[in-house]
Amino acid sequence: MQTTTTKSLWDSVGGLSNPHKMPGLSYGLPADECKVGSLLRKVKGSTCSDCYAKKGRYGMTNVQKAQYRRLELLKQDPVKWGNDMVELLRRKYRGKTGDDRVFRWHDSGDLQGFWHLALLAGIATSLPDIQFWLPTREAAIVRQYERITPFPPNLMVRVSSAMVGGKVPDFKYTSGVDDPSGFQCPAPEQGGKCGCCRACWSFTVGHVSYHKH
């Protein structure tokens, strides 16, 4: 029986991201392909009007090519993509313990539809020892999913505010930008890094407020 190599799994899903500020791995898609985000980008004062994922290294040609490749592979065969992602993450997190077993969906980009959210929930169910965090502006997709079934206990889905300093979305777990409510992200005082903070992944933290960057 031929063993699937880690490299072939990596190539099959389009690879992972390793944002320098965060404690674990991540996965990013093109910010230009956000659904709600693309609309909000045209709205002055919205949390997407000055999108961080459109600046710096995110705008580099090689990064954009990698993100679009990931999107292509995701849509091409979601079932295979999901199975390969489960096995890749299982291998990448082997040997990690405690607070190091965290993963972020979409350091860039967002959900492409209900099918996409269901796929990510299935991955979390298959990997109960990894804590997943999914920030999203796709509130309607989240509502649709919640009407059918609860999220896995290791998948934190935070619905993001539309406007900087704006109204907190009507969900149990949320995030915002430059608003005074909830837990204030400590990254600006920690060299732009999470450090030992895991609030974004925590079910004891209802709302997280980030500083605009």
Image (cartoon, rainbow, N blue to C red):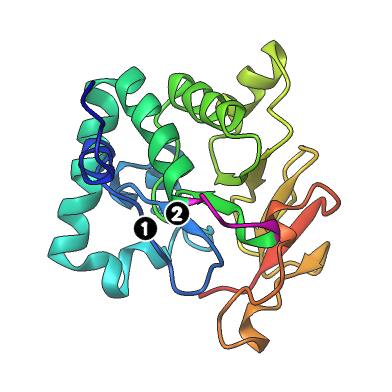
Identify which residue is drawn at 71% across, 14% down. 147
- Disc 1 crowd rating (10 Å Cα; few below 14, some 14-19, many 20+) is many
55 w.r.t. 102: above or below: below
Dominant secondary-structure state across the stretch colored magenta:
loop
Taking the magenta stretch, the answer to whether it contains residue 95 is yes
C-alpha distance separating marks 1 and 2: 5 Å
Closer to the camera in the image, 30 or 6: 6
147 w.r.t. 93: above or below: above
Closer to the camera in the image, 36 or 62: 62
List x then y, in percent, for residue 137.
55, 42
- Disc 2 crowd rating (10 Å Cα; few below 14, some 14-19, many 20+) is many
List x then y, in percent, for residue 44.
47, 61
The extreme right residue here reads: 204
Q: Which quarter shows the N terminus? A: top left
Task: Please say if the residues under marks 1 and 2 sit with CB atoms less than 8 Å apart.
Answer: yes
Report the amino acid beneath label 1. Ser
Identify which residue is drawn at 40% across, 63% down. 18
Which residue bears the numbered disc 1? 17
List x then y, in percent, for residue 111.
45, 35
Q: From the viewer's perspective, tell me whether residue 15 is left or right of residue 136.
A: left
- Residue bounds of the magenta highlight: 93-98
Q: From the viewer's perspective, tell me whether residue 187 is left or right of residue 180.
A: left
Report the amino acid beneath label 2. Ser
Q: From the viewer's perspective, tell me whether residue 77 is left or right of residue 145.
A: left
Taking the magenta stretch, the answer to whether it contains residue 94 is yes
Instruction: Kindly state the secondary structure of the residue where label 2 is placed.
Output: strand
Which residue bears the numbered disc 2? 26
